[in-house]
Every structure is written in C-alpha cells, then in structure tokens.
Image (cartoon, helix red, strand yellow):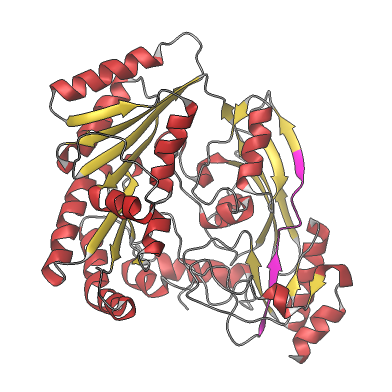
Amino acid sequence: MQSIDSVLLDLPAEVVTRDQDIISSYVTDFRRQYVGATTALLRPRNTAEVQTIVRACAKYNVGLVPQGGNTSYCAAATPSADGQELLISLERMNRLRDLDAENLSLTADAGMILSDLQTVAADAGLMLPLALGSQHSCRIGGNLSTNAGGINVVRYGMTRDLVLGLEAVLPDGSLFSELNPLRKNNSGYDVKQLFIGAEGTLGVITGVSLKLARQPRQTITAFLAVRDIISLATILDVAQIQSGEAITSFEYISRASLDLLLSAKGHLRHPLEQESEHYVIMEAATASPVLNLQECMSALLAELYESELISDGTIAASEQQRADLWHLRESIPEAEVHHGGSIKHDVAVRTSRLSSFIAAACQLVRRHRSDAILSVYGHVGDGNVHFNIVAPDGTDTATFKRRVEKDISPEIYQLAFEMGGTFSAEYGIGRVKLDLLRRYGAEGKVDLMNRIKAAIDPEGLLNPGKVIPC
C-alpha cells in the first residue's frame, strides 16, 4: 500500500477520490459477478492528467485499471479484489474536440458517452453508425477498447472500421497521438489498431477520430416471422440484393426470447398476429431523397411471402412504432435478468453457418437439460449469436448455472470452434474468457499477444490480469 500512497501524493488532489461510498459502484462489474477493491478512484480531466497518472504508476510499479462506462460483460474494467491496483475513470474527459461535416468525421475525448456523440452527429445532419443497447451509458473509449459491435455491423462494420485516428497514453506515460481524421494514411504500421480491442492492456485511450455517415432520409423497419431458421441467410441475401445493399440491421430473435420478454413485461405486446419459432427485425436506410425505399421493401416482403420464407410481417408506420420494435430487441437481456439471469455465450460463425450452429447448439442443450430456456438472439448479418441459457421456473438458479457452465458451455464453445467460429464475437476477453482464449485462440495468437504486451508494457501495469493469458 506504500507504493499506492506514493502514487497518490504525486497526483493533483482534484483527480483523486478516496471516498469508498463513491468508489463502490466503480469496483463492481456490470453483471455484478465480480467485486474488486481500490484505495482510490482517479478521474483525470484531460490527456495531460492521464499522462501524470500513468507516469506515477510506472514510477512506483502500481497496476492501473482503465474504465469507461463500466458496461463490460467480461469484467474487463474491474480491479482485482486485493486492492493493489488503482482505478482510472475517463468519465470527466467528455469534450468534443472537432466536428468536420464536410469530412464526415468527428474527434472527441474518450470519455464521451456514445449516445451524446450520436446526438452531436445528428445535430450536424449526420450519423454515427455505432449503436448498442448500452449506448446511453457506455463511453467511446470503452467501445474502442472492446471493439464493440452492435446492430449496424452488417453495413458499417465493427468499431475498428469506424476509427480514423486515435490518441493513447502508453504504459510509461508517453503519448501516441495520430488523431487526424484521414481516410488514407499509409505511413508505416497502422499502430492505432493495436489499442482497438486490447481492453486497456496496451495503453489508455484518451481521444478518437471517427467516421460519420450521411443521415438517412428514409428508414424502413420490418418485423418478420420466419418459417424456418435455415432460411435466415437466404432472406438476408434476398433483402440485400433487393434493397441495393441498403440493409443496415438484420437481427434474429427466437420465440423463447420474445416469450421471456413478454412474460417479464406485461405491458408489451406481440407485434404480429401469427406466432412463429423465429423472428427477424430488418432495417433498411438510405440518404437518397430519390430512391423509393418504401416501395422496394414492400416488394421485398411480397417476394418473401410468395417464396414462403416468411409467414407474417409488419412494417413500422411511424417512428414510435419503429422505436417499439427495437425496444423488444434491446430489452431481451433485461428480461433474462428478470428471470434470474443467464449463462451467456457470445459466439460467431460464418453467416452461412449461423442457422446450422443455432440448430445444433439447441439440440446439444436439450440432450443435457430438456427443460432449459434457450434465449437465442443476435446479429445475423455478421454471424454473431447470443446463445443464452436461462434456468427454468422452480429451479435453483445458482446450481443450474454452475452445471451449465461445467457441462454444457464447453460443448457449445467446442461446437463453434469446429464450425470455424469464435467464442467471443463482441464482448471481448476481460478476465472471464482467458481460459477460452488459451484453448481456442488462433494458432500462435496468444504467444504473439504476450510478445506485444511485453514490448509495450514490460512491467504489466496496465489492466493486469485481463486479455493476456500469461
């Protein structure tokens, strides 16, 4: 503790919080599965103060855990329970640095909340495509650190695809800054990519330049009942062709997930008259004032009916109806919590194999526990499915979860691996998935990650115990 006290003496008093009543909400992870401890919470106001903090930690060999909005599902932003690490929150670094509408870009502090950045873009007649269920609390630095996905990946890509420039404080307190929002910059290694998805283990991200898109003039949202899950890839293919690649979102929802939600929130209503085992929320958007997207989507739905790929469907007739449809998709995790929580599997396979994976994984679970509730939903357009298992009513939830994690989860991950997929599509590694990375990481990947970590952070001071399976 003497080293920590020395660090704190080197810092401006304004950035240090020792009040444990305040700190308590920062040291508990988002899913409330891990509780850490720290002597102090550090809240810098600018990049220079981040450098001061990191230099002090390097001087006295004290571990430092970066935190954005504390929304990680893998406890990536939670300090260890021994209290030997300090916690740095970027929440006070929430300044918009630049907005260049003609360049379709903005530059901001890493502590800005994602929805605030979306609002900034919208006020300029533009759009920040990154959209997540946690967008009203997650911060852009954390989004970069985990390479967040979201509902628009099918058209705009993951977070890393939106990053034009980045600023980060390195483990010795020096600064890497390449924030110019250039579309082309072929000047050696693309160093910024090292920090995207690294979860704060290689540097503390302090600023970012992001691509923006033109704000859609037309948006069409449909909720469809799919006859057979095996048709998902076909429906998406037809939709992308018919719309001229205007599809921005294509989200799968199982009947079990929707039923779970409707039972948890009695005020919500099923959007269709006819029930199905499988549903899709599909959204198309265009910035063109000329193209008739409504006519295009109506023709698409007619073709899907005639081909017997869907059995029912509705198109949102207003912005409120569109919001209501998306509310169903975004509220499923909350419904799982209402039913005692779930064992989460954030899996991705090729889009062409997603239906087969879901079907095989469901059979796998049924062989072990025929009464388990399977809450399955996800981003069909990028092959990412959230395959979650919820305890049936009348079951001891804690015991059920332990058995699922021991007996069923390994088989689900093995299935994804055998189908050429991954055990972590968008949640990252944190401290939760270290063993999975050891087992299923690409050949040579863990060794190379350790080499990079040793080269940039030889003392292992940034976010110790996360991402890198030492």
Looking at the picture, tell me which residue is in the foreground, 253 or 448. 253
Q: Residue furthest bottom?
A: 2
Q: Position of residue 17 (x, y in %)?
A: 79, 74
Where is 429 relative to 402, above or below?
above
> Residue at 61% across / 65% down in the picture?
202
> Residue at 42% across / 50% down in the picture?
331
Looking at the picture, tell me which residue is in the foreground, 79 or 60. 79
Looking at the picture, tell me which residue is in the foreground, 125 or 450. 125
- Residue 185 lies in the magenta-colored region: no
- Count of labels in the image: 0
Where is 392 relative to 129, above or below?
below
Residue 97's quadrant in the figure? Answer: top right
- Residue 93 lies in the magenta-colored region: yes
Q: Position of residue 43 (x, y in %)?
A: 76, 65
Q: Position of residue 357 (x, y in %)?
A: 20, 53
> Residue at 32% across / 58% down in the picture?
422
Q: Residue furthest top?
A: 290
The N terminus: image quadrant = bottom right
Residue 296's quadrant in the figure? Answer: top left
* Magenta highlight range: 84-97
Residue 352's quadrant in the figure? Answer: top left
Q: Residue furthest front?
A: 267
Q: Position of residue 170 (x, y in %)?
A: 69, 64
Res. 12 in view: no
Where is 390 relative to 36, above or below?
above
Res. 374 in view: yes
Is 29 left or right of 18, judged from the image as shown?
A: left
